[in-house]
Amino acid sequence: MRAEPWSWTRDGLWPEQPCCPRPRRGQSQPPCALRTRWPADTQVYYLGEGEASRRWLRQEHNTKARLCLSHMKAVACHVLARHPATTPLVWDDMLRAIPEDQLAASGVPQLVEPVLWDYGADLDIHGKALLMEKYRRCGFLRLWAASAFKGATGASQALTPIEHHLRNNVQWLQVAASGPADMLQGIVLTGWQRYDHFSVLCELLPVGIPSLAVCLQSLLHGGFTEDVKARVENFLGISSLEITDLMSEGAGSFPGSDILALVTHVGLHLRSSVDTLLERDRYVTGWFSPYHRGRKLIHPVMVQHIQPQALSLLARWSTLVQELEAALHRVFYPDAVEEWLEENARPSLQRLRALVQDLREAAGAGPSPSPHSGQDP
C-alpha cells in the first residue's frame, strides 16, 4: 500500500492509511493481503477515512464496525480460498469493542483466530479473561495472546528493560490460567523494531537478546525461578544476570553481545557526559557560554581549563562510536546503521566537535577582556 503501484488500495490519501475495504471494481487486493499474520491494529485504525468508505458509511445501518468486519471477512475468504491450510491470525484491537451479536453474526469467528495483545507490565488479568469469554461466546474456537520481549516501552527506546517484559510475560501466563480452558493456543512473543513504518528504530535485536532469553525460558518453565535464571545465565554466558537494572557493560558471550555492551555504554554515558561538560562545567557555563561562543570571546587561561577535557572526551567517544559502527555493520544493513547512529550517537558527538571548533576559533581570535579568576568581592 505504501508503494505507488498499490496507492489505489489506500483508504485515504496518505501512504500509511489502511487498505481500502471497498476497492474499485475489477481490482484485486495487493499481495500483502496474503500474509498469515494479519494486523488489525494501527493499519486499520483510520478505517473509513477514504471517500469510497465515507459514502458507504453514510448509508443507513452502516457503521465502522460493519465496515471492519466485512473487510476482514473478504480478506480472510480471499486467503483461505487460495491457501486452505492457512489460518489467518488477527490482532484484536478492532474486535474488542464490537458488540457480541454483531461479531457473532459477521462470519468472522469461523474464518480467523484473534490475537489478544498487551505489552504492558501490569495487565488487567481479570479483564483479559472476560475478553476471552466474550470471544468464545461469539464463536471463536481458538485464541492467541501476544506479549513482547522488546520494542514496546518507547518508540525511541535504546536499551531493553528486562523486568518490564518479564512481568508482561509472566502475567500472560496468569491470564492463560484464568481464561476458558483449551481456547488459548499459545503466546506470540513479539520483538518490534519500530512502532510503525514511520517511527525511529527502537531497541536493536542484539540489545534485546537477554530479555528474549529470560522471557522464553519463563514461558517454557511457567515462571522465572532461580533455576530458570541459572539456565539463562548459562545460555548467555553471563555470570550474574540483572533483571531490575539495565544490562551491565561487557556482559555476555552470546552472538551480538559486543553490540549490547557498546550500545549500553553509549546509551548510559555518552549524552550524559556531554551534557555534564556543556551544561554543568563551571568553566564552560561561566566563561564560554553561548554568548561567548557566538562572539568568539575567551581568555587564554580558560582555554587551558576547557580544551583538554573536551578533546579527551571527544577522542574517547569517537573511538567507541567507530567501534560500535563497525560492529553494527557486521549485522545490519547500512541504512539501519546510519539511522541508529544519527539518532543515538552523532548528535552528542556533533555538540562536542562544535565546542572544540569554537574553542580553536576563539583562541585564535586574539586576547579578549580579562575575566576575574573568582567571584566579585
Image (spheres, rainbow, N blue to C red):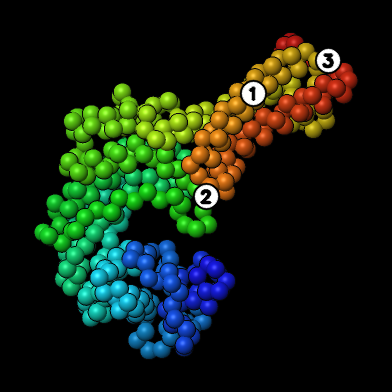
Q: Earlier along the polypeptide chain: callout 3 or callout 1?
A: 1
Q: CA distance from mark 3 to mark 1?
A: 30 Å
Q: Look at discs 1 and 2 and give the one toward the viewer.
A: 1
Name the residue at 15% across, 62% down. Answer: 183
Going by the numbered disc 2, the residue's amino acid type is: Val
* First-in-chain label (2 vs 3): 2
Q: Position of residue 80 (x, y in %)?
A: 29, 75
Give the secondary structure at mark 3. loop
Q: Position of residue 162 (x, y in %)?
A: 34, 37
Query: Which secondary structure lies at badge 1?
Result: helix
Asked if disc 1 and disc 2 are in contact, CB closer than 8 Å, the reply is: no
Residue sitting at the far right: 366
Percent x, y for residue 138? 19, 73
**From the image, which quarter does the C terminus lie in?**
top right
Q: Nearer the viewer, residue 234 or 138?
A: 234
Q: Is residue 132 visible?
A: yes
Residue that label 2 marks: 200
The tag on residue 315 is 1
User: Which residue in the structure is indicated by mark 3?
Assistant: 370
- The span from disc 2 to disc 3 (Cα, nearest Å) is 47 Å
- Kind of residue sitting beneath label 3: Ser
Q: Quadrant of residue 130?
A: bottom left
Name the amino acid type tagged 1: Ala
Whole-percent x, y for residue 373 in the image:
75, 11
Report if residue 96 is visible in the image: no
Quadrant hosting residue 240: top left
First of labels 1, 2 by sequence position: 2
Distance, label 1 to label 2, CA atoms, is 28 Å
Tell me the quarter of the picture where residue 47 sits: bottom left
* 198 w.r.t. 90: above or below: above
